[in-house]
Image (cartoon, helix red, strand yellow):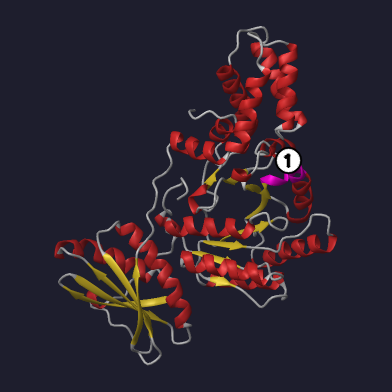
């Protein structure tokens, strides 16, 4: 899970709870969409967790009321909905909400959710077993994960540093060799020149070791990146927070969205996904798989339909269902295709009709394996979509991890996340110092 902690309770509206346990009867005209069972081993524990689960159930999207039946070690909670509501949709979002509830209970109770059929009988039962939620990574743990993920890039730099340090003191030739090494490691000429100048000013003529040079390089790289690291959650604020994802084909947009949804859902956020890549049926199906895995709803249309219209529909629905976050996928597009970039601008305009401040964030997903081409991609997408942040993926599959320094140095954009592996927790909020140390192969801050 991301290191910003659980969703703040004051973000969610708190409806008035209606429950038989409180002596309030619900009108029979309100059908129920699901039955949530809570089981405990200790009756005293039921008095503690029962009200918590009832309040969380009442806050679920589409739930208009609840009816609770208490037994000594269990509660059966009927989730009621409006007569014209879609019970299937409410059941889907209830499953997602139940996953978040189970995570907050931390093993104190067992949850099962049963779908309600049209005739009022109960259908399939689903045991709600939240995935283990990892604690926030300590700096040393984060360094270890990053060093492993950036192994190709860090090995290239570490071996290069060892190769150029043939003298006991830092002289002009060694500085020239280090600058050339940084350029070939994709940090970019401007950043490499500034790092060289800083090393020359502080360490010229002094005794040096490979370790000291690595530490100096890490410090200078961190100084370049620190103004652009993510220090707070970009998902906080009045919902739904709309985040648009853009990038070229194959950059990893859909997978990135899935990983973010997974982490946000585990942290208790109500998340909705929009499959805006209407050109590729595979992308839509991939996002649906992530939605099922995360127990979050996915708004999708048939292949080839208007992406801007889908984005508008998803935003309206996210508002109606009081979602915290709406993540919108878009079709991958080459940055030199004018008509496709114009379509992207149209999506931004259409979303703005629902809320002038939306999209609240537009993130460009960059594939680290493309190296210096990432700079040109960023330039093109900034003009088309007003980029507010970067996500760099596939850092574990390339020796070109230094390109993140070059892109940031050129475009001065915040770095939201970096991806160093296939697992959901391999997508991490960006830390300048952790990244800089890992890039040069240092395992401690």
Q: Is residue 62 visible?
A: no
Q: Is residue 401 visible?
A: yes
99 or 310, which is in the foreground?
99
Which secondary structure type mostly characterizes the magenta part of the structure?
Answer: helix
| Residue bounds of the magenta highlight | 368-375
Q: Farthest residue toward the bottom?
A: 119
2 or 57, which is in the foreground?
2
Q: What residue would you read off at disc 1?
A: 411
Question: Which quadrant of the structure image shows residue 219?
Answer: top right
Relative to 125, 279 lies left or right: right
Name the residue: 27% across, 79% down.
24
Relative to 338, 68 lies left or right: left
The answer to whether 138 is drawn above or below residue 289 in the figure is above
The answer to whether 87 is drawn above or below residue 292 in the figure is below
Question: Which quadrant of the structure image shows residue 302?
Answer: bottom right
Name the residue: 84% across, 60% down.
338
């Amino acid at each position: 899970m991301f290191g910003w902690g659980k969703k703040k309770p004051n973000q969610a509206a708190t409806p008035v709870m209606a429950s038989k346990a409180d002596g309030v009867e619900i009108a029979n005209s309100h059908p129920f969409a699901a039955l949530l069972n809570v089981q405990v081993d200790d009756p005293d524990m039921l008095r503690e967790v029962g009200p918590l689960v009832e309040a969380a159930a009442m806050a679920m999207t589409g739930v208009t009321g609840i009816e609770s039946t208490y037994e000594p070690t269990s509660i059966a909670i009927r989730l009621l909905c409006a007569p014209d509501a879609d019970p299937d949709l409410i059941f889907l979002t209830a499953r997602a909400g139940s996953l978040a509830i189970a995570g907050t209970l931390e093993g104190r109770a067992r949850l099962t959710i049963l779908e309600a059929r049209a005739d009022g009988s109960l259908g399939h039962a689903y045991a709600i077993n939240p995935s283990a939620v990892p604690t926030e990574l300590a700096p040393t743990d984060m360094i270890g994960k990053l060093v492993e993920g950036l192994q190709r890039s860090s090995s290239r730099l570490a071996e290069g540093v060892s190769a150029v340090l043939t003298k006991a003191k830092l002289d002009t030739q060694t500085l020239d060799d280090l600058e050339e090494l940084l350029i070939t490691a994709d940090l970019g000429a401007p950043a490499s020149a500034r790092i060289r100048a800083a090393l020359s000013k502080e360490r010229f003529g002094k005794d040096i070791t490979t370790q000291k040079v690595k530490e100096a390089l890490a410090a200078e790289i961190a100084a370049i990146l620190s103004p652009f690291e993510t220090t707070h959650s970009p998902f906080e604020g009045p919902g739904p927070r709309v985040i648009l994802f853009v990038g070229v084909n194959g950059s990893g947009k859909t997978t990135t969205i899935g990983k973010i949804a997974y982490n946000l859902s585990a942290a208790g956020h109500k998340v909705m996904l929009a499959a805006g890549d209407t050109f590729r049926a595979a992308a839509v199906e991939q996002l649906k798989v992530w939605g099922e895995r995360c127990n979050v709803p996915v708004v999708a249309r048939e292949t080839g339909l208007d992406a801007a219209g889908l984005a508008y529909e998803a935003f309206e629905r996210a508002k109606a269902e009081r979602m915290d976050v709406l993540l919108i996928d878009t079709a991958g597009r080459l940055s030199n295709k004018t008509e496709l970039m114009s379509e992207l601008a149209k999506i931004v305009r259409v979303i703005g009709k629902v809320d002038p401040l939306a999209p609240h964030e537009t993130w460009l997903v960059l594939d680290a394996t493309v190296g210096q081409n990432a700079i040109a991609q960023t330039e093109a997408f900034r003009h088309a979509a007003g980029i507010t942040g970067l996500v760099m993926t596939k850092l574990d599959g390339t020796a070109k991890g230094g390109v993140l320094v070059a892109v940031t140095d050129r475009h001065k954009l915040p770095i939201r996340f970096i991806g160093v592996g296939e697992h959901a927790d391999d997508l991490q909020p960006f830390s300048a110092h952790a990244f800089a140390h890992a890039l040069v192969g240092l395992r401690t801050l």
